[in-house]
Amino acid sequence: MSMPSEINRPADKGEDVRMSHAVTAPWLVVGLGNPGNKFHGTRHNVGFEMIDHISKAEGIKLNTIQSKALLGIGSIGEVPILLAKPQTYMNFCGEAVGPLATYYQVPLRHILLVYDEMSLPNGVLRLQPKGGHGHHNGVKCVIDHLDGCRGFPRLCIGIGNPPGTMDMKAFLLQKFSSEERKQVDAALEQGVEAVRTLVLEGFDDNITRFNLGQKYKYHKV
């Protein structure tokens, strides 16, 4: 699939991906975050970072604007892939995800949402086939714009909990410490491989082993 050389409107690209749907249903991989330099590197933006890592690893340029999102169109193996970073700010990201899924005819089971998760230790990943919103406003907005459907997969990136009595919003909009940054960078590399496995093989035993390995990777015996 040829890549455009600059940011453009997706008139011909959409047709390419929808035609591919007849053979292999496309995947829409959406990283949640806030647009703007001041949010770069913050805990709440690790979803954006994962999209950037996948983009680089798979050679998919994020150079199209559509449905309030920065979009990249390409493939992993023979599977059509859409990478998206909503530009709506976190609490309104469903305004991008719903229309993109409709336009490109992406089945619910192929919408992979990537986002920060405070219930997981920093740098720990978890892939799951479905779930609720867990009080994450971005995920809640996506569910609302998918007609209340929750049966889409997620890649959760652990960021841990605020220390002591620290305000949650301040924690989410804070950058990682140097040690936390090392853990997150390692997780992003592992996440790229996990997404590749999911897209090519689905939720098989490899994903089960991946989740188990992630759960205990920082446990010391």
Image (tube, helix red, strand yellow):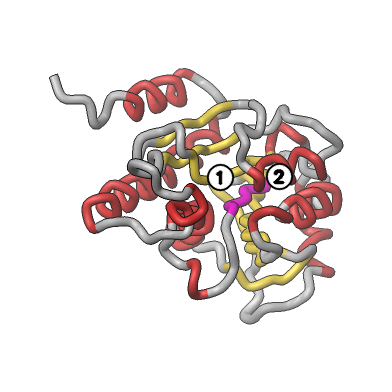
Which residue is farthest left?
221
* 170 displayed left or right of 97: left
| Residue name at image x 28 percent, y 24 percent | 216
- The answer to whether any part of residue 11 appears in the image is yes
Q: Amino acid at mark 2?
A: Pro
Rate crowding at label 2 as few (under 14), some (14 to 19) or many (20 or more) other CA atoms within 10 Å: many
Q: Nearer the viewer, residue 62 or 152?
A: 152
State the SS at label 2: loop
Marks 1 and 2, Cα distance to the nearest angstrom?
Answer: 17 Å
Q: Position of residue 220 (x, y in %)?
A: 16, 24
User: Magenta segment, which residues?
Assistant: 28-32
Give the numbered dot on residue 26. 2
For residue 114, which numbered disc appears in the image?
1
Q: Secondary structure at mark 1?
A: strand
Is 97 placed left or right of 48 in the picture?
Answer: right
Picture residue at 69% right of the left edge, 53% below the top:
91
Q: Residues within 10 Å of mark 1 (few under 14, many from 20)?
A: many
Does any portion of residue 19 appear in the rendered image?
no
Q: Nearer the viewer, mark 1 or mark 2?
A: 1
Q: Specify the quadrant of the image occupied by residue 78.
A: top right
